[in-house]
Image (tube, grey):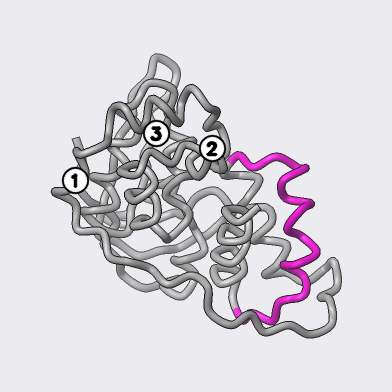
Amino acid sequence: MYEYIKGVVTFVTPAYVVVETGGLGYLLYVANPFRFSSKLNEEVTIYVHQAVREDAITLYGFKDYNEKQLYLKLISVSGIGPKSGLAILANDDHSGLVHAIESEDATYLMKFPGVGKKTASQIILDLKGKLDDLDIPAVLTEGNIQQELALPSNHEPANEALEALAALGYSAREIKKVEPEIRKLTKETTDAYLREALRLLMKK
């Protein structure tokens, strides 16, 4: 079982990153691949969870130890699979997630892809009172949104962010709801567009 991988980020896609170490390139599915865009061709340490099934061995990557532990707690809940767990973690407001669980806010939890009423209730039942050991910092997600004329449909960072939403499991209908607002933003990186898109989805 792997704890972490230290290597050079060589490839970033909407669904995964590739980290090379010891002459091998490891494909890691991560919650927000574009957070690693600024680290391209640089050495990073990514915490790893290995999932083994009859037909596949898959690696999931996390930015730090606490994010990995939160993921492991999430996928221990019946109804939360590896992909759903990543989709939940993609929103940087992990403190908001913990608060929703502790306050039994099922409506908040149901905003994540793949989480219905039954699964949201199960998350609360299984995890309430069991996340105190995690060091989850508060994240300010509102900020000022700088807006100008709508971006063209071929604007690469915005397009990549929308592709990443689909990779996380958000439906075409959900993506279309936030696309007009995303194309009004003036952000420099795909990571920034994706973070804002996830924030908007949680407000819908």
Judge left or right: residue 173 versus residue 91.
Answer: right
> Which mark's residue is nearer the viewer, 2 or 1?
2
Secondary element at image label 1: loop
Residue 104: horizontal and vertical position, in percent? 38, 38
3D distance between C-alphas at marks 2 and 3 = 26 Å
Q: Quadrant of residue 159?
A: bottom right
Q: Amino acid at mark 3?
A: Thr
Marks 3 and 1, the one that precedes in the sequence: 1
Res 108 seen here? yes
Q: What is the three-letter code of the residue carrying label 1? A: Glu
203 versus 188 height, above or below: above
Residue 189 placed where, x, y %?
59, 75
User: In the rendered structure, which segment of residues is drawn in magenta?
Assistant: 169-188
- Nearer to me, 203 or 11: 203
Q: Which residue is mark 1?
A: 3
Identify the mark nearer the N-term, 2 or 1: 1
Q: Which residue is mark 2?
A: 110
Q: Which residue is mark 3?
A: 58
Question: As drawn, is 134 to the left or to the right of 156?
Answer: left
